[in-house]
Image: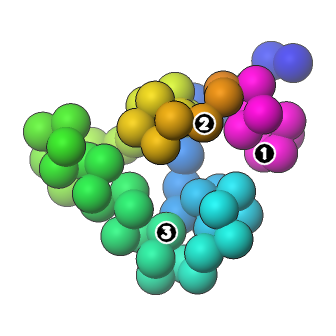
Amino acid sequence: MKPTRMIIYPNDVALITGKTDRQARNILNKIRRTLNKTPDQYITIEEFCTARGLPLEAVLTKLF
């Protein structure tokens, strides 16, 4: 499966985790702080999987 994008968005995180949109934004902000990224930098799907300990293939299946 070839993903069409490499960025993960709050609605994707909400879909994967079952959390609300607000909680998903908080998760991404926490990952962003951990990775020392600025608020305007994106989180990749791979960074999200690594930070949360999720298998990349399972997440890609859920998203695409």
Quarter holding the C terminus?
A: top right
Mark 3, other Cα within 10 Å: few <14 / some 14–19 / many ≥20:
many
Q: Position of residue 38 (x, y in %)?
A: 14, 47
Q: Is residue 22 left or right of residue 1?
A: left
Q: Main secondary structure of the magenta part?
A: helix
Amino acid beneath label 1? Leu
Q: Is residue 40 left or right of residue 36?
A: right
Q: Position of residue 4 (x, y in %)?
A: 73, 29
- What residue lies at 78% left-to-right and 34% top-to-bottom? 58
* Mark-to-mark CA distance, 3 and 2: 15 Å
Q: Is residue 21 above or below residue 9?
A: below
Residue at far top of view: 2
The tag earlier along the polypeptide, 3 or 1, is 3
Q: Residue 58 lies in magenta, yes or no?
A: yes
Q: Position of residue 62 (x, y in %)?
A: 82, 45
| Residue ID for mark 1 | 63
Indicate the secondary structure of the residue bearing disc 2: loop
Q: Residue 60 lies in magenta, yes or no?
A: yes
